[in-house]
Image: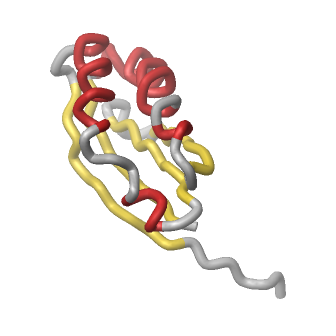
Amino acid sequence: MVIELLKFKVALDLGEDFIQKDAQIWTTAPAEYPGFLGKEVWISPNHHTEVIPIILWATREQWKALPQADLPTIESKFIPALGESYSIVESAEYQVRKFPHL
């Protein structure tokens, strides 16, 4: 499994709206593609302007097979919903390795 981690800085008064629109637009769209396993959104109790979506993919190949041409179309639905009240501050990739219980 591969984890796609994104970190957004969101206007303080739009955090909950960002999370709801993200679920409606940026979660439903990738769910249509093979390899999408799910998504979590992490909120820091200490940094109220940070929103961290964690996207789970079966394989890196399936994640990277997401058609790049589709991304601007998805984003074009998201921007009108929130305006320019957010910015991406980090993007990272992690592999999950499971170990047997000791």
Q: Position of residue 53 (x, y in %)?
A: 44, 43
* 44 and 60: which is toward the camera: 60
- Residue at position x 82%, y 82% from top? 101
User: Quadrant location of residue 87?
Assistant: top left
Q: Which colour assignment does the render follow?
A: secondary structure
Q: In the picture shown, does residue 3 fall above or below 75?
A: below
In which image quadrant can residue 84 be found?
top left
Residue drawn 44% across the image and 57% down it: 63
Q: Quadrant of the N terminus?
A: bottom right
User: Against 63, is 82 above or below?
Assistant: above
- Residue extending furthest toward the right: 102
**6 in relation to 14, above or below:** below
- As drawn, the residue found furthest toward the bottom would be 102
**Furthest residue toward left:** 84
Count of all numbered marks drawn on residues in the image = 0
* Residue at 32% across, 14% down: 13
- Asked whether, in this view, residue 29 is left or right of residue 13, the answer is right
* Residue 3 horizontal side relative to residue 97, left or right: left
Say which residue appears at 42% left-offset and 31% top-offset: 26
Residue 34 x/y as whole percent: 56, 51
Q: Position of residue 92 (x, y in %)?
A: 33, 61
Q: Of 26 and 13, which appears nearest the observer? A: 26
The C terminus lies in quadrant = bottom right
